[in-house]
Amino acid sequence: MLKKTFLVSDMHCANCSMRLESIEDDLPGIKEINASYHKQQMVVEFDETAVTDEQILAAVKKKGYQAVLA
């Protein structure tokens, strides 16, 4: 399991955080997502053999946000 931080500068409220945390249900291999709109970041714990950084970034984009690996 890896734990990585992604910066999401266009996350502004609790609903944004919940929306990004719902990616956990969309991608297999993600154990947990903790998104903080105060810090404008999300910490993702995932199985690197099941999901890639690029897949996570694409899922964030699909939710309507832009993310970069911290």
Image: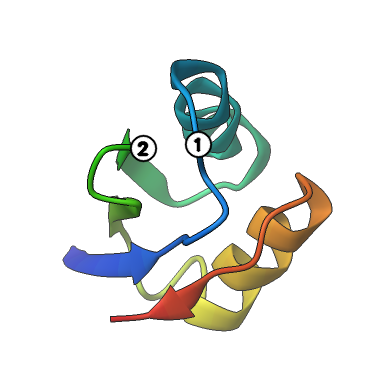
Task: Identify the residue at horizontal 28%, vertical 81% (top origin).
Answer: 70
**Residue visible at 68% across and 55% down in the picture:** 65
Q: Amino acid at mark 2?
A: Tyr
SS class, disc 1: loop
Question: Which residue is at the front of the view, 39 or 6?
Answer: 39
**Residue 62, image x and y in percent?**
82, 53
Q: Position of residue 18 (x, y in %)?
A: 50, 21
Picture quadrant of residue 16: top right
How packed mark 2 is, by other alpha carbons closer than 10 Å (few <14, some 14-19, many 20 or more), is: some
**Residue 7, x across and y down, in percent:** 38, 67
Residue 19 vs residue 11, the one in the foreground: 11
Measure how far apart labels 1 and 2 are at the Cα level.
5 Å
Q: How is colour applied across the structure in the image? A: rainbow
Q: Relative to 26, is 20 on the left or the right?
A: left
In this rendered view, identify the residue nearer to me: 50 or 23: 23
Label 2: which residue? 37
